Image (spheres, rainbow, N blue to C red):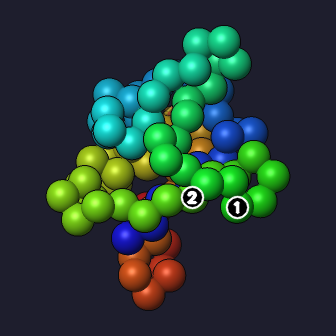
Amino acid sequence: MRVEFDRDACIGMYQCVVEWEDGFEEDRDSGKAILIDGEEDTEDVYVRDVPVDAELDAKFAARACPVDAISVYDDDGDQVV
Ligand code: SF4
């Protein structure tokens, strides 16, 4: 499973941090979240693999985001959230 984070879309509500505390952290200076261990894929879009034991948390984080800045993909590349 893979998570994709559109940092440009993020408005810093930090629900993702609550849902997946090992995946996202607050960056109060920029008013946006940080995808922990994320690599920049395209400009301001960060990706990383999701550990098996964090898949549920990653999906909850994606569902909780009010601006759909977080997407989750299965191993076939299909978007699940
Ligand atoms: S929930 Fe969405 S808008 Fe809020 S900090 Fe996380 S990614 Fe940004």
Q: Position of residue 52 (x, y in %)?
A: 23, 65
Label 2: how many Cα within 10 Å (few below 14, some 14–19, many 20+): many
Residue drawn at x 48%, y 80% is 78
The amino acid sitting under disc 2 is Val
Q: Residue furthest left?
A: 53
In which quadrant will I find the C terminus?
Answer: bottom left
Q: Residue at x 43, y 48 (%)?
A: 62
Read off the residue under disc 2: 47
* Mark closest to the chain's N terminus, 2 or 1: 1
User: Hey, what amino acid is under mark 1?
Assistant: Asp
Is there any visible trace of residue 41 in the rendered image?
yes
Residue position marked by numbered label 1 in the rendering: 41
Q: In this rendering, would 47 be left or right of 57?
A: right
Q: Are marks 2 and 1 in contact (CB under 8 Å)?
A: yes
| Residue at position x 75%, y 46% in the image | 44
| Residue 21 percent across, percent down from the top left | 32, 33
Q: Residues within 10 Å of mark 1 (few under 14, many from 20)?
A: few
